[in-house]
Amino acid sequence: MGLERTSAEIARRSEALKTALLDSVSHDLRTPLATIRAAAGSMLDDSVVWTAADRHEAFQAIDTEAERMGRLVRNLLDLSRIEGGALKPELEPCDLDDLVSQAVKRAGVPTTKHVAIEMPDSLPPVLADQLYLGQVLANLLENAIRHGGGAIRVRTSRLPDGLVEISVEDDGPGVPQAALPHLFEKFYQAGPPGEGKRRGMGIGMTVVAGLTRAMGGEVEARRSELGGLRVDVRLRPAIMPDHLAKGSAAVPGAGTGGPTGEAPPDVAPESGR
């Protein structure tokens, strides 16, 4: 009887997770699809007179929402690979200046919000998979845009232990302190005190944690100095000889999945985040 009750409980929870995922996917897909259809439908209406600015705004809306749907699909695929242990990052030296600026550009930040980027000139490249790190930044920026206020800040720094930290924070209502350790759990949705839960699938942060740890990094959520949520991603620096770091010569080991030069000791992945 005990085994039957356990099996029934597992089946019930599995069905509940499937239902939650389907509800969240349908919700997250419905909004961008509605925006795309509305914009495309208006452009097909011959009775509507379009100025050049109007057409540009409509195309921008379609492009932004299509990118949002693309991130949703990528998150689902990444989650499947994370759970299946199929992630195989191609680690290489990555310049954060380019990666961060491109991620912010692709994020489609509304005009009502402002993203401040703070990066020191002396920051070394990090050892990462460019596609994985790009997805991590995209998820963090989307979360800050969706749930934050008008200010978003992206900061990078070199920590005393040698790791490079990338922080994305906002000035929104944040999440309860008790929710921070659970923020990277699958399907977990946190909301500010006294309000409903944040809408969404609850897998964006799970993907952030999975991709970061696959690259040998670590991730942590905390309260932001701006008042909202802050997420820190820490990665190993790519150690290169001076003549390669200053020149344009090819970096040995790039794209092979292994570190360049003598990397610092691996950082054990965090648990329960």
Image: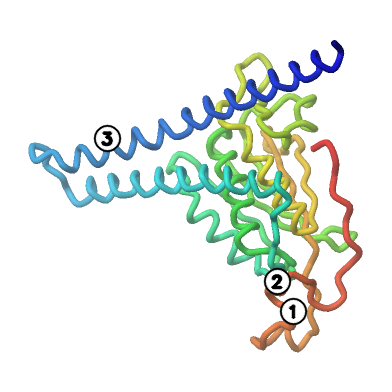
Q: Position of residue 200 (x, y in %)?
A: 56, 30
Which of 20/133 is in front? 20
The residue pinned by badge 2 equals: 92
Label 3 residue SS: helix
Q: Is the Cβ of the residue at disc 2 closer than 8 Å to that at disc 1?
A: yes
Classify mark 1: helix, strand or loop. loop
State yes or no: discs 2 and 3 in contact (Cβ < 8 Å). no
Q: Amino acid at mark 2?
A: Glu
Residue 159 location, x and y as percent? 84, 58
Name the N-terminal-most of marks 2 and 1: 2
Quarter of the image where one finds residue 37: top left
Vertical arrangement, residue 74 with respect to residue 239, above or below: above
Amino acid carrying mark 1 in the image? Gly
User: Looking at the image, is 117 positioned above or below residue 271?
Assistant: below
Question: Which secondary structure lies at badge 2?
Answer: strand
Residue that label 1 marks:
253
* Nearer the observer, 72 or 249: 72
Quick one: label 2 or label 3, which is nearer the N terminus?
3
Q: Is residue 87 left or right of residue 161?
A: left
Horizontal arrangement in the rendering, residue 195 relative to residue 244 (left or right): left
- Left or right of residue 270, residue 145 in this image: left
Q: Residues within 10 Å of mark 1 (few under 14, many from 20)?
A: some
- Residue 160 pos. (x, y %): 89, 59
Which of labels 1 and 3 is toward the front? 1
Q: Residue at x 50, y 49 (%)?
A: 107
Dot 2: few (<14), some (14–19), or many (≥20) neighbours within 10 Å?
A: many
Residue at left offset 19%, top offset 43%: 43
The image's mark for residue 38 is: 3
Q: Quadrant of residue 188?
A: top right
Q: Residue at x 91, y 64 (%)?
A: 265
Of residue 76 and residue 232, the one placed in the foreground of this image is 76
Choose the circle earlier in sequence order: 1 or 3. 3
